Image (tube, coloured by chain):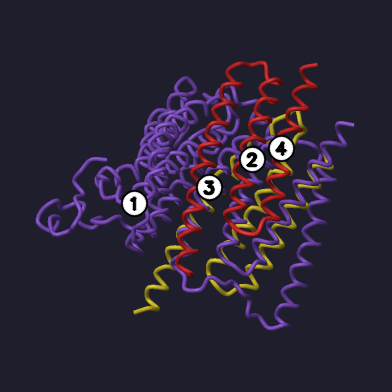
Chain colours: A red, B purple, C yellow
Amino acid sequence: MIDIMAILLIFFGLFFFLSGSIGLLRLPDVFSRLHALAKADNIGLAFVTLGVIMLEPNILNDIKVVIIWLLVMAASAISSHLIARRALREHRGDD
Amino acid sequence: MIEILWFIFDIMLVLLLLALAWTTCSTQDVMRAVTLFIAMGLLLAVIWARLKAPDLALAEAVIGAGISGALLLSAIKDYPSNLMVSHRSPVMRGMINIFTIALTILMSWAVWHGIEMSDGKRLSEQVASQLSISGVSNPVTAVLLNFRAYDTLLELAVVLTAVLTVLILNEKRADHKVISPLLQGMTRWLVPLLVITSGYLLWVGAHAPGGAFQAGAMLAAAMILLQLAYPSIHQGFNLYLLRLLLVIGILIFVLVGLWMMLLNDDFLAYSPAWAGSLILIIETAATLSIATALTLAYLGGRPTGWENGLKKSASHKDSHTDNGRVK
Amino acid sequence: MISEQLLYSLAGIGLFAIGLRATLLHHMLLPRLLALNVCGAGVFLIFIAIAYAGVENMADPVPQALVLTGIVVAVSATAMALALGRRLEALKDE
């Protein structure tokens, strides 16, 4: 039962990854692409993390997975910010 | 059923890898090529994990994707053109293509034949039979720092030589001016975490995936992150310390080797009772050296005041920066 | 097990071939370095594919150790080549 729940959660997460990737491919400019990617991937990763925690009985490994999730969130927020700022600067420079 | 799923997964990984490699090599924009190369490094890390080589997965994620990515991205600025177009004549291109295809077929045949003909005997059996006296229980660390310690010593020498060449050739790259408070904020959190993780990897390398290379690379990644967030931080480096750190890995390695030569008549032949501690000592020193080497390699040349680092007097005050501060 | 070994070592050969072709085709340093690194990754992949010993077992540690040192040497060699290239560019400007 828990296994099925976990797999459903992981697939739910993968759906967010998929939509984020479609956004990356389909949207027109850097900013909207970042918007699609950063948000969708963070939510997707949250669901995948939940699913993995359900599958992994060892509490220490669960803590590590949660730490990884938090770090990836922080890193994706900062890198999105840096990319967006760089793009904005170039955008202004072109005008 | 499960075999088929594994097979589909394998095919997807391989196709993605080949596609990334192809686009890395055929795109016209250098920036795009470097980005794709970093993605390929990450994918390789996944593949190492899939092929049950977790030590490699760790190293590839830190070095292949992280550090060489940073290195290449910062190097893009050094070159005048951002386009990568091949100017070979059509005849030459055809010859290169034919040569590559012929070589590929030949190599595929050789590898296929080799795998089909293999008698299933592996070096891992020899490693496993000697593992109990190596002082560590992670077979990769045992191979690196006990059975093939010579190779690792010489590899450290190769890294040192490469970095010395970098230091001889250039001054460090000009600092970039753009400062991001957000990045600085995260760096303050992340760098201590990276240092702890690096220490953990060093310690855990004795019995689980990890070791000096992964730990050193992670430490270097922390330094590179600091350098990115605080562009002037290298001015605070203590250059005496930096020189010492750069060579300490080889120094300790050779000293331990010579010491063992006095005791056991053979260079780097550890006494089994001490092997574990000796390996940890060598690995700690090697971690520091690798971290310093990779950081300096990223800087792309001598930090400011490198030449004056040894005479700390009048000439020193002329430079704009204060090199005396301890980092 | 043999099928995985074959699949991944053929992928390694493919990577090597792609890298080699691009190394020969390009003139400029940075694309060539990227291509050479792709080449090297292909060699590493062949090593580890042959070291693979099934899902339950760790891969053979000796090729793993070889590739581990290879990765570190590759990144230092890349750094050295980039430094040489930068020096060359600086000399061209003078």
Q: Chain of mark 1?
A: B
**Residue picked out by circle 4:** B50
Q: Secondary structure at mark 2?
A: helix
Mark 4, other Cα within 10 Å: few <14 / some 14–19 / many ≥20: some
| Residue with the mark numbered 3 | A80
Between tags 2 and 4, which lies in front?
2
What's the mark number on residue A41? 2
Asked if the residue at tag 4 contacts the one at tag 2, i.e. Cβ–Cβ closer than 8 Å, the answer is no
The furthest residue to the right: B1
Instruction: Name the residue beneath numbered marker 1.
Output: B231
Above or below, comparing residue B242 to residue A94 in the picture: above
Name which residue lies at 81% across and 16% down. Answer: A1
Query: Do tags 2 and 4 sit on the same chain?
Result: no
Mark before the other along the chain sequence, 2 or 3: 2
Q: Tell me whether marks 3 and 1 sit on the same chain.
A: no
Q: CA distance from mark 3 to mark 1?
A: 20 Å
Q: Which residue is at a point 75% across and 34% down the rendered structure image? A: C53
Marks 4 and 1 sit apart, C-alpha to C-alpha, by: 38 Å
